[in-house]
Image: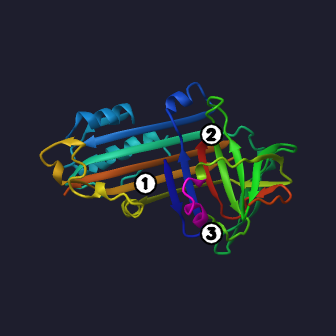
Amino acid sequence: MRRAIIGSDVFQIVYFHFQGSFKDCFKGSNATLVTLDSRISLSFVLKPSFQEIARDTYEAKTEEVDFANKIISADEENSWVEKATGGLIKEVLPSGSIDREARLVLANALYFKGSWDQPFNPSKTQHRNFHFLDGKIVQVPFMTGNIYEQYHWRTFDGYRVLQLPNQGGEETRKLSMYFFLPDEKDGLPNLVKMFNSKPGFLNQQFNLRLKELDDFWIPKFKFSFEFEASETKKELGLHRPFCPGELKEMVNSSSSEKLYLLKVFQKSYTEVNDEGTEAAASTAASIILCCATYPAPSFVADHPFMFIIREEH
């Protein structure tokens, strides 16, 4: 599950990648909490084949909704999202996003809360300069580790990578947060372009080295972002669901030939602090009729960077 987020001053990419069953992977772990919920609100009857996939593969709950009352319908979806994301996302469907022509809403929500395997020392937090892409400098709290602690780290051509594992989970199925820091303070746009030109780059093994870092600082941060993603989906090549008749295998209805995807709303929230990471992401779709170098080991994230949260293979 991927969420790409681009801000005006800082390019921010959130990438969630998990495989297998969430419940089985983190059963019995109180240090890492991952929940994935799905919901289908509809005024049609789903075909048994699609209902089986929704129930067995995605564990989606199906509920009948009266879309003629659009205010109550949107409120119900947003209330479900708020609960599924631990209160981090309170509204994914904006006011007026569901009208009387709506027939289905497909929603999913991901909530993640993890504790660092090596927690940061709160007493060592310092306010330091952070440099934005436009040259603006602000003072923000930075975290650092304890003396003699080692971290998985490596430099590449033009950027460096840091891995911070989370506690919990089975030994072979842990979650980690990866930071990708460009060498240049304004290097993030080029780094994003490079990653986009190499499909599957973020899924690879980076062969990091365990090092004691001479200079190590990560900022505390939190942000949220939302956008309507239908045009982005089309630019990525997803066209058929937006065409009438392409969703007829989903529902039993004489009107299925007129059913198509209209809007896709996405919203995400991420917070990183001394204890760990808390993140949530939600999507709601409304359907209607009709070469390495090795300098001195350091990692000072005092300018825009990328990060991902992924399951280790």
Amino acid type at circle 2 is Glu
Give the image location of residue 127, x and y in percent: 76, 59
Q: Residue 304's quadrant in the figure?
A: bottom right
Circle 2 crowding by C-alpha within 10 Å: few under 14, some 14–19, many from 20: some
Is residue 94 visible to the viewer in this orientation of the structure? no
Circle 3 crowding by C-alpha within 10 Å: few under 14, some 14–19, many from 20: few
Q: Residue 44's quadrant in the figure?
A: top left
* Label whose residue precedes the other's in the sequence (3 or 2): 3
Which residue is tagged 3? 190
Predominant SS along the magenta part: helix
Residue 154 position (above or below residue 175)? below
Residue at point 28%, 37% (across, down): 50
Residue at point 67%, 53% (across, down): 179
- Magenta range is 192-201
Which residue is tagged 2? 312
Which residue is tagged 1? 266
Question: How many circles with numbers are drawn on the protein?
Answer: 3
